[in-house]
Image (cartoon, rainbow, N blue to C red):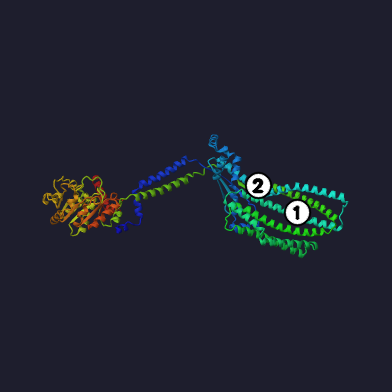
């Protein structure tokens, strides 16, 4: 059994594939046509989709060197990073919501009846708008043009005008969004200053009133020379100190603004970035390196102030100190950047967050420098505060009151200047996106692409057709070709009988001796005689009924008889005998069964068909053929026949449905299997051969009955000679008629 199983495998050749498709060409063409027709129906009834595109030139907000270093270190950085950020901003939910409001898309897309039905089902106006937001987001495609700052925004919809309007409105809303994002920190700064001015005005009025009351009570109106100098110095440092404090508050406001921008983003990434930001900001106060740098910078600024009191700005000592301060500022900025990079290791940031974090890092670095400067100015101011305490009490009080007024006046003036600057900066901010090509009304649909869809349908049809052909071939368990029969049987092919159309006389060799099919039977008979050698008894069986075993053996017997051999054909098919019917001799009352059972003599049942060819019919059909075939008289019968005939051909029933062949097969000189392509089953052929070999039967070979151009390569070569000869004969006969 293992030998047979090992023989099942054979590489599929190109010839096998062609034969397979030739046999199932109708199925293949039907599937291809069906898929193409379905594709055509889809194209006819599908709704055309139009695409409108707007081209935008984007100039992302410039990043500081600190931000660039951070982005490069954390994300690997590339030129396309800025454009990726803008792509995220273009498709943001807030932009789409503004488009829905500006174009009134809820009423434009949903009919009155549809909207009323949704409201009746319990949906609110907000639910409808949110659903529409998701739908419109799916229509929009934003694709950057490689190595440029240009993006193409495309909108697809079945309504051409709606696609155009959404594309153009999205470009406008996006530009407005850029302006809002750029204005946000300036707006926060302006709002902070506006909130401080009324408070400062109140404090200034109160300080002025206190000074007036003091002068009226004491009668002291002017400070002496030393006190006046001290007043000037304190006022100068107070002004610096307050200016630095205002700048620090502005930086804190900027950081708060960026935090508010980050809060607008949803998702895990935004929470991770915010957590990293908070963790890093808290570490600044305990970072020993930053603490040391701030103290060093404060000391350097104190030393610079001392030098500036003695030497001009052009002095080398002053310039050297300024250089040291500048280097210290760079070190502070670098340390802030390193803190963020360390906290963000292993994180992959959404490009939309990078601009926010860049602003955060820049503001945090500036804040650290400002705090160091505030510390330095505070130290110098404290020195003059100490000296102030050496003055008489009345002068101290007068100087302190005048100083408060001067500080608040200078601070008030400074705030007014900053307010005007903030207003101008805020008003000057515009969107940094320019519409290069606005969307126009599309004239042709982009979906479905009829040519492409038909091509895809054709390719898909071919693929499915091939798949179905292979599937049908796999599911078909019959032996379809001569090559398969030879491979599965592992037996030699000793005969190939072509398909014979409209057989009226089954004794084909007798009635059509020169026909190609008759020649093939003669060849099979000759091969069998050669294979038998000195053996005389051979049986013919098949796997299943209707494979033509009786037809083949009867014609082979006639062919052997014509070659001069004395032949007898014995019908051992005790279930469905056909020999007498095929020979058209009529049913005989007694036959081989009667001889075996002892009811008749051998001479009484032998019938003459033609010269050198006799036959024996079945006779009385037994109720149990197994008992008959198990009788010892079978051996006696075969011995008697061997004495009288050169060849004894026995017609046996199909081997897969009965055990008759196994009962007497080992008593014969050999057995031949008749297999018909498309009829015999693979497993059936395997089982028959295994069973016969198990009981010691000698299998002489296989005769393939019913070969044609579909199942045998032999067919073409075999018939080439006969077809050419036939044509010549026809041409000759036509010439005779013409003459």
Instruction: Report whether residue 673 is seen.
Output: yes
Residue that badge 1 annotates: 242
For residue 735, side relative to residue 273 (left or right): left
- Which mark sits nearer the N-terminus, 1 or 2? 2
Q: Quadrant of residue 357?
A: bottom right
Instruction: Report whether residue 571 is seen.
Output: no
Q: Nearer the viewer, mark 1 or mark 2?
A: 1
Name the residue at 73% across, 58% down: 375
Element assignment for label 1: helix
Residue that badge 2 annotates: 180
Q: Position of residue 690 (x, y in %)?
A: 26, 56
How far apart are labels 1 and 2 at the CA level? 30 Å
Which part of the image, by quadrant, shows the C terminus? top left
The crowd level at tag 2 (other Cα within 10 Å; few <14, some 14-19, many 20+) is some
Whether label 1 touches label 2, CB < 8 Å: no
Element assignment for label 2: helix
Q: Nearer the viewer, residue 197 or 417?
A: 197
């Amino acid at each position: 059994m293992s030998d047979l199983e090992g023989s099942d495998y054979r590489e599929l050749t190109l010839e096998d594939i062609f034969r397979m498709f030739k046999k199932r060409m109708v199925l293949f063409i039907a599937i291809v046509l069906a898929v193409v027709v379905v594709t055509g129906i889809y194209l006819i009834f599908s709704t055309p989709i139009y695409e409108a595109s707007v081209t935008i030139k984007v100039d992302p907000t410039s990043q500081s060197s600190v931000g660039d270093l951070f982005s490069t270190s954390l994300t690997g950085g590339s030129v396309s990073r800025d454009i990726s950020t803008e792509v995220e901003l273009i498709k943001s939910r807030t932009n789409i919501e503004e488009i829905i409001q500006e174009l009134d898309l809820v009423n434009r897309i949903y009919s009155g009846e549809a909207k009323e039905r949704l409201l009746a089902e319990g949906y609110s106006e907000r639910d409808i708008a949110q659903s529409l937001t998701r739908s419109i987001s799916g229509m929009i495609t934003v694709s950057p043009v490689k190595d440029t700052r240009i993006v193409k925004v495309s909108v697809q919809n079945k309504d051409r005008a709606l696609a155009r309007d959404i594309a153009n409105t999205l470009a406008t809303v996006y530009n407005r969004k850029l302006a809002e994002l750029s204005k946000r920190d300036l707006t926060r700064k302006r709002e902070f200053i506006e909130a401080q001015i009324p408070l400062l005005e109140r404090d200034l009025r109160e300080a002025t009133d206190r000074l007036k009351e003091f002068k009226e009570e004491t009668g002291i109106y002017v400070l002496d020379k030393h006190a006046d100098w001290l007043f000037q110095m304190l006022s100068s440092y107070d002004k610096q100190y307050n200016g630095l404090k205002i700048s620090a508050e502005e930086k804190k406001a900027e950081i708060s603004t960026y935090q508010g921008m980050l809060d607008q983003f949803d998702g895990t990434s935004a929470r991770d970035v915010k957590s990293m930001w908070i963790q890093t900001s808290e570490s600044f106060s305990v970072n020993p390196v930053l603490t040391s740098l701030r103290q060093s910078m404060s000391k350097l600024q104190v030393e610079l102030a001392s030098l500036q009191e003695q030497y001009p700005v052009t002095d080398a000592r002053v310039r050297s100190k300024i250089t040291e301060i500048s280097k210290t500022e760079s070190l502070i900025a670098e340390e802030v950047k390193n803190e963020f990079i360390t906290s963000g290791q292993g994180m992959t940031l959404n490009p939309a967050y990078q601009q926010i974090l860049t602003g955060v890092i820049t503001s945090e670095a500036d804040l650290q420098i400002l705090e160091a400067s505030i510390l330095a100015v505070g130290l110098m101011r404290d020195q003059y505060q100490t000296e102030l305490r050496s003055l008489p009490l009345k002068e101290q009080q007068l100087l302190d009151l005048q100083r408060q007024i001067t500080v608040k006046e200078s601070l008030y003036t400074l705030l007014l200047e900053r307010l005007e600057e903030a207003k101008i900066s805020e008003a000057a901010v515009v969107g940094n996106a320019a519409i290069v090509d606005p969307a126009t009304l599309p004239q042709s649909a982009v979906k479905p692409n009829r040519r492409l869809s038909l091509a895809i349908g054709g390719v898909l049809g071919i693929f499915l057709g091939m798949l179905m052909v292979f599937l049908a071939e796999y599911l078909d368990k019959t032996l379809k070709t001569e090559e398969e029969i030879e491979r599965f049987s592992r037996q030699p092919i000793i005969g190939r009988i072509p398909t014979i159309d409209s057989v009226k006389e089954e004794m084909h060799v007798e009635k059509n001796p020169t026909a190609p099919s008759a020649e093939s039977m003669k060849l099979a008979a000759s091969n069998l005689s050669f294979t038998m050698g000195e053996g005389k008894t051979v049986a013919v069986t098949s796997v299943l009924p209707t494979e033509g075993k009786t037809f083949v053996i009867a014609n082979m017997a006639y062919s052997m008889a014509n070659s001069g051999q004395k032949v007898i054909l014995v019908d051992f098919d005790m279930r469905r005998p056909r020999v007498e019917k095929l020979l058209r001799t009529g049913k005989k009352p007694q036959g081989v069964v009667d001889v075996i059972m002892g009811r008749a003599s051998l001479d009484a049942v032998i019938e003459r068909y033609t010269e050198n060819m006799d036959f024996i019919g079945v006779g009385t059909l037994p109720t149990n053929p197994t008992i008959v075939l198990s009788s010892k008289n079978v051996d006696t019968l075969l011995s008697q026949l061997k004495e009288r005939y050169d060849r004894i051909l026995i017609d046996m029933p199909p081997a897969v449905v009965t055990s008759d062949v196994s009962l007497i097969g080992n008593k014969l000189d050999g057995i031949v299997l008749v297999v018909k392509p498309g009829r015999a089953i693979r497993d059936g052929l395997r089982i028959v051969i295994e069973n016969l070999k198990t009981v010691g039967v000698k299998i002489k070979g296989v005769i393939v009955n019913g070969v044609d151009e579909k199942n045998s390569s032999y067919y073409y070569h075999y018939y080439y000679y006969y077809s050419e000869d036939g044509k010549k004969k026809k041409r000759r006969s036509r010439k005779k008629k013409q003459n």
